[in-house]
Image (cartoon, rainbow, N blue to C red):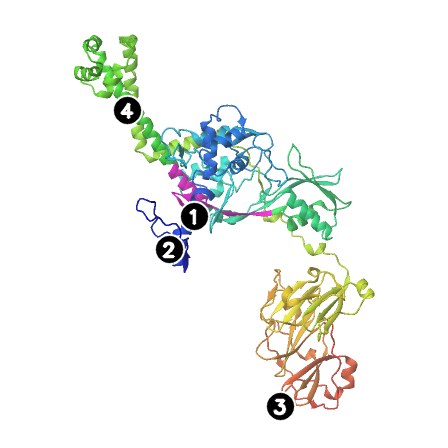
Amino acid sequence: MARKKSKETALPKKKSDAYIDGAGLVVEQKITQTLETNYMPYAMSVIVSRAFPEIDGFKPSHRKLLYTMYKMNLLNGGLTKSANIVGATMRLNPHGDATIYETMVRLSRGNEALLHPYVLSKGNFGKQYSKNMAYAASRYTEAKLEPICDELFKDIDKDTVDFVPNYDNTTTEPSLFPATFPTILVNANAGIAVSMASQVCPFNLGEVCETTIALMKNPDFNALETLKGPDFPGGANMLFDEEELDKIYRTGRGSVRLRAKYNYDKSEKCIEITEIPYTTNVEAIIDKIRQLIKANKIREISGIRDETDINGLKIAIDVKKGVEVDKLMQKLYKQTPLEDTFSCNFNILVKGYPKVMGVYDIIKEWVSFRMGCVKRRTAFDMKKKQDKLHLLKGLGKILLDIDKAIKIVRETKEESDVVPNLMVGFGIDEIQAEYVAEIKLRHLNREYILKRTEETKALEEEISRLEELLGSDRKIKQVIIKELEEVKKKYSQPRKTGCYYASDVVEIDVEEEIPDYPCEIFLSAEGYFKKCTPQSLRMASEQKLKEGDFISQHAETANKSELLFFSDKCSVYKAKLSQFADTKASAMGDYIPAKLAFEKDENVVFAVNTTDYSGYMIFVFENGKVAKVPLDSYETKTNRKKLANAYSGKAKLVKMFWIKDNANIMLRTTNGRAMIFDTSLLMPKASRETIGVQAMICKAKSTVEKAFVITDEKAAELSKYRSKNIPVAGSFAKDIEDPDQMTLI
């Protein structure tokens, strides 16, 4: 439950005083009702009035700014200070000058955030691809509208779109722009609202116009034939994945992978990055490469610097002698933002409601919207011509007797009676009579009237044509197609984003970049793991452990090896040894259950260190069964972190071992029996959760309680317990001690 609280003070007692019903009272209210009445209006306001673009391609903030500039005559006029534009826009947008100016910066040519900018800028407007290149204050920069904005405002004064009051009802603004091309697909747009977001990628203007025309002619047209994928203002190369693009075109969701473009200067031994993915910036790329160099994961680079200047973006990477540049770039693509992904989420407002649509649906909605604009424009033009025709027909009647018209005006005593007398004298209506009455005396001649009335026939033909157009959706579409062809001819430009294909991708194993050096690893019974270099152990080899803990496994290995941590919940967790930092013996080390995100109450019971997944895992269960599983059963093509069902849970596990080849295993039972057998007697099972085969027969309700890997010498010494076949019951062995257990990982 939610409670509304307010102070119970100064309530007006007189009826004449202002009084709010329920003020000062504590009212119990369901939380769902509170959300619906208080939070939902806010959420919808953010979605509808701020965050999402509409079918004309603009958010309200963009529309208010551009319309203000249009009314300031900045489409055809000269440049003006940005501060003037910001100030004027505040009549429509009350959210502050800083917000308005940031909006203008993004729409500007200088910022390079849009494929087709709407604001022609002069001065420093920053760069979309650099977070450090900040834009100058509005008092230093100048701006006007780009010529392409003519397509946004064309016929806006012919009732093509609705106008709504501004925030204080002092003026009006358009609810949408009657854009003559699908701007929503031409320029990138992103927004985050309450509980939902929008991310629209840009497409090439010429390709969008061509695709729209093709879909208007044939709704079953395949957009992939003309729309070759997104076209980003920053260029770069796009992975052409036809299946993924078709998904984006149909659903509005998907992702596009982008790669930076580069060239290599052999004389300077320098890689020059000239175009980067739209989703990243210069600083992020340089910082990541420097981190890799510092961590010794990339050794081919001797230096990196930002050489971006007035000519455009450039990241210079100095490489060492003998480096394969293409191979190095493949590694950088894999490990840095030089290759990045643009996630598409075409969430657009349609008639006031957010809707996720693919390219096909967006074009369909835009065509429907544009047809409405053309119909309204046609109706507006037709009404104007009908009004003019009506006046000219009245003027034509005057032509029959000009002297009579003059006589009526001269002989009328009262000015207010002139129009009624003309109406009676010539049989015309008030509008026609008013028009005749306002004609100057010098124009009351036959030549003037004949010239004006000659337009009557042309007007009648034009009105007939407009009526025919207004009644035919097919002809309306022909008008839209003609406009799209003109836009394509005037404003289309070559694609900036190129394409590469999956066959061009060379998979580089990043393992090559991991430094390889000898190290020793330790695992304690409590689950603490350490990786120590021989040098650090020579300085201090005494291991620090928690009270009661001890080292259960130890091995000498190399930094490129992999680790498998078996848990007591029949799972195995995989990790690369290079993921663990070098530490000293005096440190506690990494707690494996926390490091590898074990489940609650899950602990480490055994660890395996390998480079090639050779050898076998031996699992000994208390019912006398033993399983032999090849270690490569735990190898996966994908980089999986956890494998379930790593061993059988049908019986209680007594011990597990990793052996590189066959070994001698000793089993001991709770009733004092022992047996030794060679693991060559066990057939390996590829299934990880196999229960194995019976190796020892447990009698008198006894169970296997201990298992050991013993040396050949020890096996020869205890030859009377050795069995050449399994299963066996074993012999009583109260006279032997447990052998030392091997603890190598």
* Left or right of 270, for residue 216: left
In which image quadrant can residue 494 be found? top right
Disc number lying in front (1 or 4):
1
Q: Residue furthest left?
A: 424
Residue topped by disc 2: 25
Residue denoted by label 3? 699
Residue 517, above or below 393: below
- Residue 104 shown left or right of residue 26 in the figure: right
Label 2 sits on what residue type? Leu
Q: Is residue 368 visible?
A: yes
Closer to the eye: label 1 or 2: 2
Dot 2 alpha-carbon crowd within 10 angstroms: few under 14, some 14 to 19, many 20 or more: few
Point out residue 465 in the picture as x, y percentages from the top left corner. Answer: 31, 26
Q: CA distance from mark 1 to mark 3?
A: 75 Å
Disc 4 target residue: 386
Task: Pick the residue in front: 510 or 582.
Answer: 582
Mark 1 / mark 4, whichever is N-terminal: 1
Residue 640 coordinates in the image, percent (x, y): 61, 62
Q: Which residues are magenta?
A: 340-369
Is residue 57 among the parts visible in the rendering? no
Element on which disc 4 rests: helix
Q: Are the residues at dot 2 and dot 4 in contact (C-beta closer than 8 Å)?
A: no
Q: Earlier in the sequence, mark 2 or mark 4?
A: 2
Dot 1 or dot 2: first in sequence order is 2
Q: Helix or strand or loop: what does disc 3 sit on?
A: loop
Q: CA distance from mark 2 to mark 4?
A: 63 Å
Q: Nearer the viewer, residue 432 or 33?
A: 33
Residue located at (40% from left, 35% from top): 166
Instruction: Give yes or no for contact between labels 1 and 4 (Cβ–Cβ under 8 Å).
Output: no
